[in-house]
Amino acid sequence: MSPLKHTLRGLLLSLWFAALTFPIMVIKVNPVEGTVTWRWQNALFVAGGVFFIYLLVQLALRHKAASKKAGASDDTGEQESFIHRILQDQKQKYLLGGILLAVAVAFPTFSSSYQTTVMTTALMYVVLGLGLNIVVGMAGLLDLGYVAFYAVGAYSYALLNHHFGLGFWAVLPIGGGLAALFGILLGFPVLRLRGDYLAIVTLGFGEIIRLILENWGEFSKGPSGISNIARPGLFGIELSLDSAIIYSYYLMVLFVIATIFIVNRLQDSRLGRAWIALREDEIACQAMGIDKRKTKLVAFSLGAFWAGIIGVVFAAKTTFINPASFTFLESAIILAIVVLGGMGSIVGVILAALILILLPEYLRELSQYRMLAFGAILVAMMVFRPQGLIASIRRTYKFEKPAPAGKPR
């Protein structure tokens, strides 16, 4: 296509996008004062921005096509990112881990309580993303109702604390265990399902849990929610609000480290390889003698366990929960973290969780365009980098012929 045709196509695309976003970006109605404000400059910004992005995309596609044509593309080189090269070197990996740990430990000393709370929330989503990464990223089971397990953990702590006075540390394993039990209960009926059918069943499960919590008032106090939930305890010491915020932050740092360690070990284990085999080809996986039912149930229950644990932390951190905290949007955000970071990639999921949770908090001035930007980023990622920000490297094994007797290998 000639440059003139590209320019005309870019102009038409920008005009179409400006017309599509016209009601949101241009018209502002004030129902209190009964006025309508026309923000025509926003239409110009949208059109100009889309045209500029279109030109950048075309340049990137041309560069990619030229690289392929010149034979400069190398499969291994494309998969191994800068982060992967650091992680393959033990010294650099430990150095990077030490720096990140030092920054994480010192973070509350040079930041406000608000910043610490925001970072605690981001770390919670890191653990949630790593938990869902087991189900979706490793086992390849599309779960759209993950927030239901999160709700089970949160309500377990809220109800046990409200009725029986149980503390945070006593309920933490109970909340995780109950969520894992619900994961097994969900896993049984979906053993034969996959793809879109599995997504619909899990979506329905998430909505059922939310509707039960919303309508069974005697059990969950309905939409009013449960308040005055106890914060995490520290050997019976009464903590001030600021101290409790810092304490919750350090708890989440420990949870993140433990989750990364366990998920990484699971990924390298026989079970982790079975999950990846299940994701790649379910029939071939079964033909190799892997128990499909057991593998799926373990994936569902482990993913649900992490969601239940973080649900307990969420209830203790906010001291108030209601069903509005566990809508489908939460499941979508956690799934977006896994997809954006890279299916099966631990580093990618961590990076994506920090980006998707921290950026909206620090860009509150643009909060009304948040979902628009959210969708645009996901569409762009699926088109230009479907493997995610930091894709997991596929492990390959090479067969080497043994050296003849008497000759060194």
Image: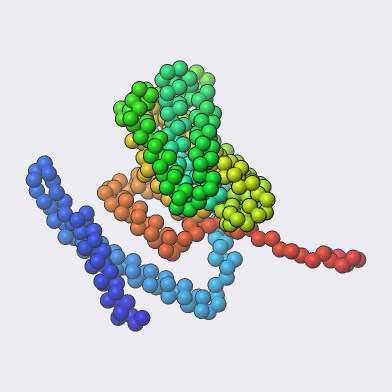
Q: Position of residue 338 (x, y in %)?
A: 47, 50
Query: 261 or 328, which is in the foreground?
Result: 328
Q: Whole-percent x and y of residue 280?
A: 57, 57
Q: Residue at x 42, y 25 (%)?
A: 158
Q: Residue furthest right?
A: 406
Residue pictured at 63% horizontal, 57% vertical: 284
Residue 259 placement, left or right of 59: right
x then y, percent, for residue 231: 43, 25
Tell me which residue sits at (24%, 58%) in the image. Answer: 21
Q: Residue at x 46, y 62 (%)?
A: 385
Most extreme residue toward the bottom is 2
Image vertical order of residue 81 relative to residue 327, above or below: below
Is the residue 56 above or below the residue 119 in the image?
Answer: below
- Relative to residue 47, is residue 187 drawn left or right? right
Q: Residue furthest left?
A: 34
Relative horizontal placement of residue 189, taking residue 31 as reference (left or right) = right
Of 60 and 201, the residue lying toward us = 201
Q: Please determine whether, in this image, residue 225 is positioned above or below residue 64.
A: above
Q: Quadrant of residue 201?
A: top left
**According to the image, what is the colour scheme of the structure?**
rainbow
289 horizontally vs 62: left or right: right
Q: Is residue 275 visible?
A: yes
Report x, y in % for residue 326.
38, 37
